[in-house]
Amino acid sequence: MPKQPRNHEPTIGIFDLLERTDTDEAQTTPLRGHPDLTLRDEANAITARVFRNGFLEDLHAGQWSPVLSGPGGSRITDAEMKKLMIETSARLAHWLYLRELLLDERPDAYFQLLSTMRRMFTHRWERRARTCDLPGAETRQATVCSCHASLSSTASS
């Protein structure tokens, strides 16, 4: 039996909804059930746990190279990207599972988790910005080199 063509209308509608609701309001909306936390605070906590503090941190810990400073230079291999996405998705699934458990049984514990993540990891992160400009290659090199220099001088003292 030949395959029936798929109806893409619901998919197109969902992506349209994603675009229409990607607003500043999404960054500042209070988290349901907690007056001091926003959806952005929850997003920052999830990002820190499932993305930033995972394999990406290993990639970030490497040395900066002027060879990779141009816009055409690949900074991550296909295998590294695959590992990053698999591990991030697995960690995100775990976070969402834990969130469902806690919100059903102990919402206060979930809010405490978010507050702790904010205090420990994301207190300096943006809470409203939706993008940012990247510095030029010269600035990036100077910043990275100065970071490594201060780490080496601290380590040797």
Image: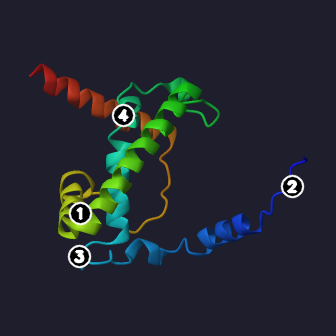
**Foreground tag (3 vs 4):** 3
Residue closest to the eye, 141 or 50: 50
Residue closest to the eye, 41 or 34: 34
Disc 4 designates what residue? 144
Disc 2 designates what residue? 4
Among the two numbered marks 1 and 2 on one chain, the one whose residue lies closer to the N terminus = 2
**Residue 127 visible in the shown view:** no
**Residue 121 visible in the shown view:** yes
Please indicate whether residue 138 sits to the left or right of residue 40 in the image: right
Within 10 Å of disc 3 (Cα), the crowding (few <14, some 14-19, many 20+) is few
Name the quadrant containing residue 143.
Answer: top left
In whole angstroms, how far apart are the C-alphas of marks 1 and 3? 13 Å
Among the two numbered marks 1 and 3 on one chain, the one whose residue lies closer to the N terminus = 3
Cβ atoms under marks 3 and 4 closer than 8 Å = no
Amino acid marked by disc 4: Val
Which residue shows up at 23% across the image and 69% down it?
107
Name the quadrant containing residue 64.
Answer: top left
Among the two numbered marks 3 and 4 on one chain, the one whose residue lies closer to the N terminus = 3
Disc 3 designates what residue? 36
Q: x, y percentage for residue 14?
A: 65, 68
Which residue shows up at 31% across the image and 60% down it?
99
Amino acid marked by disc 3: Asp
Cβ atoms under marks 1 and 3 closer than 8 Å = no
**Foreground tag (2 vs 3):** 2
Amino acid marked by disc 1: Tyr
The numbered mark at residue 110 is: 1
